[in-house]
Image (spheres, coloured by chain):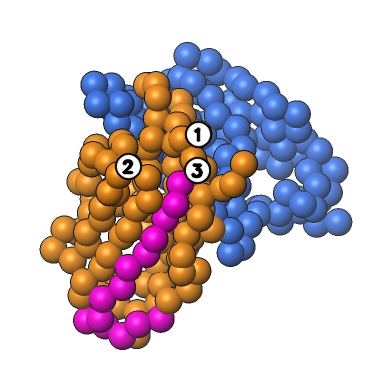
Chain colours: A blue, B orange
Amino acid sequence: DQQVKQNSPSLSVQEGRISILNCDYTNSMFDYFLWYKKYPAEGPTFLISISSIKDKNEDGRFTVFLNKSAKHLSLHIVPSQPGDSAVYFCAALLLEGYNYGQNFVFGPGTRLSVLP
Amino acid sequence: EAGVAQSPRYKIIEKRQSVAFWCNPISGHATLYWYQQILGQGPKLLIQFQNNGVVDDSQLPKDRFSAERLKGVDSTLKIQPAKLEDSAVYLCASSLGNRVGGETQYFGPGTRLLVL
């Protein structure tokens, strides 16, 4: 049972336009969400995060929106650049609290191609 | 600041053989994670250490996988014996681990394992 879903395996966008990557989750207990970007032959790198107490977080060209009632988040990249071409993973975090344990659950990823 | 180091980068073995991966986290990071990423899927958490103690190993196939983090720094992940379905990228990540919630994980480049 996939707790974090990214239903679009790939997305192509023209340079300069907006890229919108979507992520849905099933567990309403998740309270922190992160986006990671991965280039081939490298490990994922952190991009941006959002706490469940917020509905938007912005960092430069990257904005993450969270809709808790819909259990949906999205990553917007504006404007898109060819260097943004990578696989983007959505991750959800379930706090374990007492033992400071953290259980990250990753989605399957969306491959973004930004065309020049 | 040096990143998360992993070795080897690539490993090819035959089924039923044993293999070990090594991870050196970012200095000062108390929490260390091992993930398995099968082609086309997101990373799946195998085990999480807080210092040298195991916080979560619920998804670790304990009949063949083992991991240790002696002295709370470096970690090794071992598979014995390997099966064909263990072919994947094994990612190590670390985080500061000094507070609850919302921590960024820093990933190593991964070890790509192919079991023939």
Q: Chain of mark 1?
A: B
Q: Nearer the viewer, residue B8 or B110?
A: B8
The quadrant of the image that shows the N terminus of chain B is: top right
Q: Secondary structure at mark 2?
A: helix
Q: Amino acid at mark 3?
A: Ile
Q: Amino acid at mark 2?
A: Gly
Q: Is residue A13 above or below residue A91?
A: below
Q: Chain of mark 3?
A: B
Span of residues in magenta: B12-26
Q: Earlier in the sequence, mark 3 or mark 1?
A: 3
Instruction: Identify residue for label 3.
Output: B26
- Does residue B35 appear to the left or right of B61 in the view shown? right
Whether label 3 touches label 1, CB < 8 Å: no
Q: Amino acid at mark 1?
A: Thr
> Which residue lies most toward the front here?
B71
Q: Earlier in the sequence, mark 3 or mark 2?
A: 3
- Residue B103 lies, in percent from the top left, at 46, 29
Q: Residues within 10 Å of mark 3 (few under 14, many from 20)?
A: many
Asked whether residue A9 appears in the rendered view, the answer is: no
> Can you tell which mark lies on residue A12?
none
Q: Are marks 3 and 1 on the same chain?
A: yes
- Residue B41 lies, in percent from the top left, at 44, 58
Q: Secondary structure at mark 3?
A: loop
Instruction: Identify residue for label 1.
Output: B104
Instruction: Identify residue for label 2.
Output: B72
